[in-house]
Amino acid sequence: MTDRMAEATEREAEGTGAPSARLFETLSPRRLFLRAAVPGALSMLASSLYSTVDVILVGNYLGETAFAAVNLAMPFVIVLFAMADLIGVGSSVPIAIALGRHDEETASNAFTCACVMIVASSAALGALVFAAAPALMALCGASGELARLAVEYLRVYALCLPGTAIFYAVDNYMRICGRTRESLGLNVLMAALGAGLELLVLGVLGWGVGAAAAAYSASLLTCSVVAFVPFARGRMVLRFVRPRPSARLVRQIAACGTPTFLNNVAGRVTSVLMNYFLLASGGETAVSAYGILMSIDGVVQALLYGMVDSLQPAVGYNWGARLFGRVREIERWCFGAAAAGSVALGCAAMAAPEPLIHLFVGGADEALVSMAVPAIRIFCLAYLVRWVSFASQSYLMAIERSRAAATMSVCTVLVFPVLLIVCLRGLGLTGFWLNMPVTALLSGLLALWMLRGLRDDMA
């Protein structure tokens, strides 16, 4: 009887005109997971699959040098979108908490100010990276055709950034409004449109890496416009208002978004260092092998991030409403799902490395295959424990423990990997492939240590 009454209450809440975020209070953790985390994971997977398709098409149509060039430029491309991600994630936490306190005016002001900040910062950052692209590739040790292709790829993204970066924030706002299905549909549309355009420019028209970047940018721009139509028409809980920026709001957005920003930027610094040493130690073949590892990691990260990040608004809402019992129940689902997904995907990749290699580089020669097979099997050991730090960092961000989340982020993507580059370098290329598993283990231990005191906060 109790279960039936709970389900009836949930259906009633879904059918009312109350803000969709109120469902965070009424849906059982199991149904909330199915409604938010599953579509969120599929949404992030759709988004990441386009990036995966991007490198697959480049590797198959343009060859190994272009594939290596894209992987050299990719860390800087991710940095281009990192500021929008900082503002999008950073504003989502105070927005969700404000909705938990039923303060929709404050939430809408934070939403509006965040959108303005994203466009302005993207224009400035895009101009800076466009001018600095040749110097950045030279710092990576690239020269000749490899450097030329990498610069071309990076500059297209920099030029289009003011209209494309906001796509990486709007997904957060749609989930806060309870529009997880629409978010999934938007990401599927972006992936399908981008893949179709890139297949056209590479496979049919025979254009180069710049056209591949332009295809993805056109897809992002189109879907950004589509995503903001319901916000502009007032059909969402969040709405555009006359912005009232304040130093307090900017500090709050910066504090809550810094862990994600550091994760993106510090992680790319590590990738640049890895590419530099790999290029010196194993040439383009080693960079290509590392690119395959990062492509695999992109898919796994997207699924994990989609699951735990999609429940961040629910955690923040219930934390703001002081419903700590629901926070604990939701987090049990987050940690359990992250563990199951991480281990399953890691084991699958270890079991079939060669098909993955030929998927990303269709004409992979024997040198690349012989290098990448052991690299994948060693690298994927990380997924046995990586879920611990992943879910912990998301939890800390959702409850405004930004300092702890930022510390974990910097250690996971910069401090531990860079120290291990030095410590494991004597093992040759094997030391580079071991970097992620050892980092994951150290990060998991750090996460468990940081979570130890949170029970007292929920008393």
Image: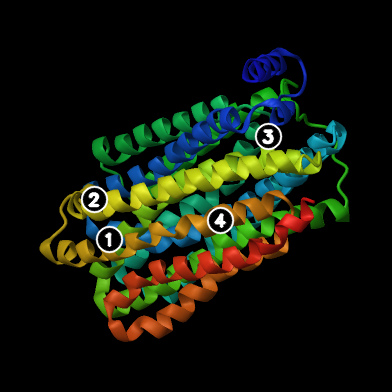
Q: Nearer the viewer, residue 26 or 67?
A: 26
- First of labels 3, 2 by sequence position: 3
145 over 312 or under it: above or below: below
Give the amino acid at mark 3.
Answer: Ile
Give the amino acid at mark 4.
Answer: Leu
Assess whether mark 2 and mark 1 are in contact (beta carbons under 8 angstroms).
yes
| Residue at which label 2 appears | 356
Inter-mark Cα distance, 1 to 4: 28 Å
| Residue at which label 1 appears | 376
| Residue at which label 4 appears | 80
| Disc 4: CA contacts within 10 A as few (<14), some (14-19) or many (>=20) | many
Residue that appears at 22% across and 52% down: 351
Q: In terms of secondary structure, where does tag 1 sit?
A: helix
Please state the horizontal and vertical placement of residue 29, each as a whole percent of the image. Answer: 61, 33
Tag in front: 1 or 2: 1
Residue that appears at 14% across and 67% down: 367
| Residue at which label 3 appears | 176
Q: Is residue 315 left or right of residue 82?
A: right
Assess whether mark 4 and mark 3 are in contact (beta carbons under 8 angstroms).
no
| Disc 2: CA contacts within 10 A as few (<14), some (14-19) or many (>=20) | some
